[in-house]
Amino acid sequence: MVRILAIDFGERRIGLAISDPLGITAQGLPTMDTKKVEDIFSHIQEIIKDKKVTKVVVGMPKNMNGSIGFKGKEVGRFIDKLNQKTGVEVVAWDERLTSVQSQKSMREMGTKQKKKEMVDKISATLILQSYLDSLSKGDKDFLPDGI
């Protein structure tokens, strides 16, 4: 049973999602409020340990032309620290337009929950589902033998 954690990094909130054990679907986890969590890396390490996570996918904000801007460089530094502190593989994944998709999904669902927290949670779920879908089309390196 292998699980992948997705992170939608933000200064105020971090959206989180986790795969099912077969790596087919993504489910949102509670959003992490960075102002209320003393050490975000310890909190993420706890999730990795509790959920038996073997890979972390972090949404990488890119400009529409594919270049990396200021926010992307900030996420790159976060990924570097995450690599050092967790000991699991960390993958940067293109997150262009996930916030727009999240807001559209919320409108369609008619959600009444706190909007910004829900956007971050849905964004993390979309990032992870996109990554899982790409793996199902070819790269199965995250699945244990026999699956």
Image (spheres, rainbow, N blue to C red):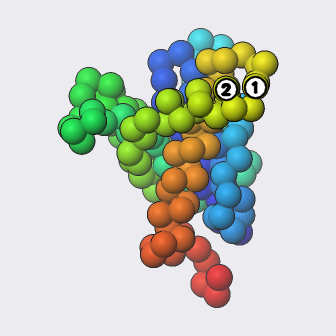
Q: Secondary structure at mark 2?
A: helix
Disc 2 and disc 1 in contact, CB within 8 angstroms: yes
Judged from this view, the residue extending furthest toward the bottom is: 146
Residue 94, percent across and down? 38, 45
Tell me where residue 77 sits by quadrant. top left
Q: Which residue is painted at 76% across and 25% down in the image?
A: 110
Please say if 144 is above or below 33.
Answer: below
Q: Which residue is painted at 58% across and 27% down in the image?
A: 103
Q: Nearer the viewer, residue 54 or 124?
A: 124
Disc 2: which residue: 107
Please say if 120 is above or below 44.
Answer: above
Residue 62, percent across and down? 31, 36
Q: Which residue is painted at 69% across and 68% down in the image?
A: 22
Disc 1: which residue: 110
Question: Can residue 67 be seen here?
Answer: yes
Please state if 16 lies on the left or on the right of 10 as rendered.
right
Q: How packed is label 1: few (under 14 Cα within 10 Å), some, or many (20 or more)?
A: few
Q: In the image, what residue type sits under mark 2?
A: Arg
Q: Nearer the viewer, residue 68 or 63?
A: 63
Please say if 111 is above or below 42.
Answer: above
Q: In the image, what residue type sits under mark 1?
A: Gly
Residue 55, percent across and down? 53, 56
Q: Nearer the viewer, residue 94 or 143?
A: 94
Judged from this view, the residue extending furthest toward the top is: 35
Q: Secondary structure at mark 1?
A: loop
